[in-house]
Image (cartoon, rainbow, N blue to C red):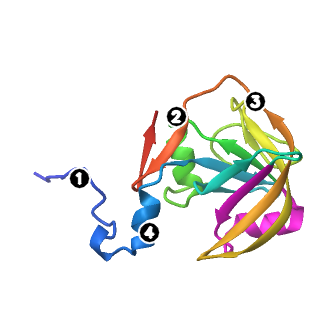
Amino acid sequence: MVSVTIHSTDPFATPDEEKSAVRRLRGRLASPVTLWTTPGPAGLTVSSALIADGDPGRVLGLIDDESDFWDAVETSGRFAVIPLAPADRQVADRFAGLMPAPGGLFAADEWIETDYGPVPAGHGTWAGCRLASSRQCGWALLVEAVIETITVDSPAGPLIHYRGRYREL
């Protein structure tokens, strides 16, 4: 008989005492989990995102500058930001590269094509953004974009990332 142990923690995670103090501090801040997509199509799960109100409104996020998403955004100059809900955990993992994506990132699920990038069918809240600037910020790329269009539907509870795990309110 084969025995399988289910861990309550990630056995491959870096132990807290080996993480930098900055990484441990960041892990103690709850972050919204969003999906950023762009024509191409390409997409990336982003949990370091902020919406700044103003005229025009802005989106700021920290992304991987070596990602396929960033390569596609540099070409298109625009992208969609979609807040994810607790039911979207697998979508978040797939676009974060933590889960296999047979046939590509967009092969599963249904998508609605927009001028800013694909939006998952059934997600009524998203923003269409035009790239304004980018610069290195720590080990990430700080991306700033102008919000050009917003669709807001009835609020679903957010998917939150806290201390290396997904949470919900």
Residue 61 image offset from top left, x and y in percent: 68, 59
For badge 3, the amino acid type reads Val
Using a 10 Å C-alpha cutoff, classify the residue at mark 3 as few (fewer than 14 neighbours), some (14 to 19) or many (20 or more): few
Circle nearer the N terminus (4, 3): 4
Residue 156 visible in the displayed image: yes
Q: Secondary structure at mark 2?
A: helix
* Residue on which disc 1 sits: 7
Give the residue type that dot 1 points to: His
**Vertical arrangement, residue 22 with respect to residue 101, above or below:** below
Q: Of callouts 1 and 2, which one flags the residue occurring earlier in the amino acid sequence?
A: 1
Toward the left, the furthest residue is: 1
Say which of marks 2 and 3 sits in front. Answer: 3
105 displayed left or right of 163: right
Range shown magenta? 58-78
Number of residues whose C-alpha sits closer than 10 Å to that of mark 1, classed few (under 14), some (14–19) or many (20 or more): few
Determine the residue positioned at 36% across, 73% down: 19
Name the secondary structure under disc 1: loop
The residue labelled by disc 2 is: 87
Residue 165 is situated, as x and y percent measured from the top left of the image, at 40, 50
From where the camera sits, is residue 103 visible? no
* 31 drawn magenta: no
Q: CA distance from mark 1 to mark 3?
A: 38 Å
**Distance from label 4 to label 2 (Cα)?**
27 Å
Q: Who is closer to the viewer here, 76 or 5?
A: 76
Alpha-carbon span between mark 4 and mark 3: 33 Å
Tell me if residue 126 comes above or below residue 13 in the rendering. above
Residue position marked by numbered label 4 in the rendering? 23
Inspect the image, locate mark 4, and give the three-letter code of the amino acid beneath it. Answer: Arg
The answer to whether residue 64 is left or right of residue 12 is right
In this rendering, position of residue 23 left or right of residue 78? left
